Amino acid sequence: MQNGDGTPEDDEGAKNGTLGRRSLLTTLAAAGLAGCQGMLGDEGEPTAMETATDEPTPTPTPHPNGTPASVPAGWPDVRDDYYGSLATTLGREMGLPGGEFVYGDTEAEALSAYRVQSDAGTAEPLDVSGDDVPFSAAARVEVTEETENAWNVTMKATVQDRDVSEGDLLLGVLYLRGPEESENQPTLRYVSKDEANESTNMVRGVEDMQPVDEWIRYYVPIQFDYDSEAGAWWTEFFLGFGPQTIDVGGLALIDFDKNVSLSNLPSGPATEPTSDDDGDWEAAADERIADHRTSELTVEVTDAEGSPVVATDVEVAMQEHEFGFGTGVDAKHLLEETEQGDPYRENVKDLFNTATLTNHHKWRFWQDEEFISDGATEWLRGRGIDVRGHAALWADVSGWAVPEDVVRAMGRTWEDAGVTDPDLDPEYVREQTMAHVETVIEDYGDDLIEWEVLNEVIHQPGFVKAVNGIAATDDTTMEDPDPVEAPILREWFSAAREAAPDGMPLGINDYNVFVGPYESERSRYERQIQYLNDGDAGLDFVGLQCHFSQSETLTPEEIMSGLDRYAQYDVDLRITEFDMADEGWNEENKGTFFHRFLKTVFSHPAVEEFLVWGIYSPTHWQGDAPFFTEGWGEKAPLEAYRDLVFDEWWTEKTGATDTNGAYSTTGFKGEYEVTAVVDGQEVTETVTLGDDPATVELSPE
């Protein structure tokens, strides 16, 4: 069993640090960078394997003129220029209250507090005087051999001068650089805990850091869930990711007590690396957007006799995007907990042209509360919002997506709904699933624009197992056939194709197929796509759920590569469930990632829809929606969304007709109103701008 930081609970060597210690004090002292000796020497008598010897430590060098560095009001005086600049950044620029520096008042003291905890690792002082960085104390860490676990090589610094209490917030700050000569990808995991709770990690939202070959500042929020005394808690860096070289500098740990909220602390890298292999990702994305998302529009203006009208003003005003910008909608909240004018209703109406009911088109919800399903669908359609079907079949019993009689026939219990007498009946499951697919799709007809026929088959194969005579319980497996290539999948799609209006897109949806390190699930999704595509009913689109944490963000290059991987099967793509529920992820950094992600996916020609999975945190499935806090406070991703969707990608043009009475322009694909004044009469026409150039004629009746 593993601890919260990934260490096994019974790994006494990792717990007690008995892998052999090498103090940074020795190496830093030689470079004049070591700090207070007391910060290093109070960890008890070394064991037979703890062979580090503390050497005399030079007195830290004060600020050159002997006066404190400049710090904002409320911050303690420090005699260290770097700490002074750090306090200014956090206090003045970010608006954080004053915090106290842990491990001493200088960066050298902080760095010298850390000890390498393994003979497989070394740390040597690093001269950064020519690196144009604000700090001066740094070390180059070498991991020289492969280890079984990341925690087999660590740098650890115990906090000797203060207790920590439940709810206390701290902020780790460090600069990292991954030299090109590193044998493996430089990787560091920041951990904080105490000796009584070694199965925990109090770091929030920041996991493995993999620096590039330039110095980048990282912020690491820490919030303790328990009390701990001085000398019993620490921070440390896990480094056992194979032989590697990694540079560490600019270390600081700042104690804010309970004077700040976790969401206000910065988190992750402070800047994007200039050496990123993506290069100028945004210019490349803009070029693709111009190629795939815009088209030519010509307006021809004539008078009542049909003669061209020269030099008259023409206004081209976009009304709606062709691309689907959407959200997941909580149907019950919409109908039963809001009324006309409520911010939830107004923002759904104003921000989106597409929507998915997060639950009420699923089987059991629809069967038990069809009046809510239908009412929410009608409300959305009445406001010009296209509605998607999500999802005809989803075998998640705990998600209340399966009727009780079908659960029983799947051979499993469901105590919450009173199903305690399972009776596996493959034919009943087949009949009921086939009938439901036909019924629900026929019922809505062309009121919906498309259907996800199957949701999360990779992770919830219960229907497939039951149809094949295997109880749909967690302790059963199905290998022949693999659930993602089972014949019943094609049967369900054939039923859906027969029931759906002509031309209605039908697709699938799943998670861990785009976000996160889940290569096996990506491969299985590809096989499912190919299997369905080769069937008689075919496959029109693929849904990619995107539930991001900060540690799972993607670069533009990774986004494009992931989209290309699925687009090669000649299917359209949907970003179906985008959110960033991560309490340790700073909102401004979320906004930056949101801008990058949305612009990149919009630039890919196979992507037709992008849906955030809810907008309001109190109704969000994880309590952290992308756009609004409780009380309708606006988050940074909302600003990024508006800037792109309703400004950068929104066409409003005016101009005058030429000598032929024509005005031409380029616009984003969508619906337009085009207006000109002819013989004193305002003439307006609507036009749809799609893949092909469009021409609209304006003439008075």
Image (cartoon, helix red, strand yellow):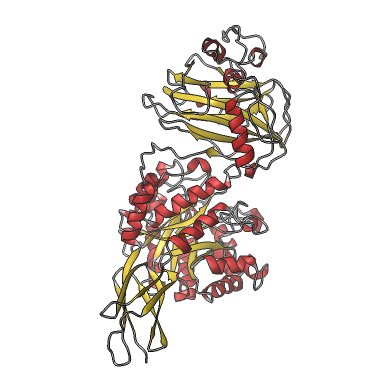
Quarter holding the N terminus?
top right
Quadrant of image for the C terminus: bottom left
Find residue 346 and report its image quarter.
bottom right
Q: Residue at x 56, y 35 (%)?
A: 219
Residue with the most extreme front position: 65
Q: Is residue 271 above or below residue 487?
A: above
Give coordinates of residue 468: x percent, y percent: 44, 54
In the image, 643: left or right of 368? left
Q: Position of residue 366 (x, y in %)?
A: 56, 68
Number of callouts? 0
Above or below, 608 relative to 384: above
Q: Residue at x 29, y 70 (%)?
A: 692
Residue 485 placement (x, y as % from top left): 37, 53
The relative height of residue 202 versus residue 356 in the rendered view (above or below) is above
How far across and how far down the image is residue 286, in percent? 36, 55
State the residue in front, 93 or 459: 93
Q: Nearer the viewer, residue 201 or 266?
A: 266
The quarter of the picture where residue 626 lies is bottom right
Which residue reaches farthest left? 660
- Quick one: 305 or 231, which is closer to the camera? 305
Q: Nearer the viewer, residue 559 or 313?
A: 313
Query: Which residue is painted at 62% across and 68% down in the image?
Result: 334
Asked whether, in this view, residue 487 is left or right of residue 71, the answer is left
Whether residue 650 is visible, yes or no, is yes
Q: Is residue 480 visible?
A: no
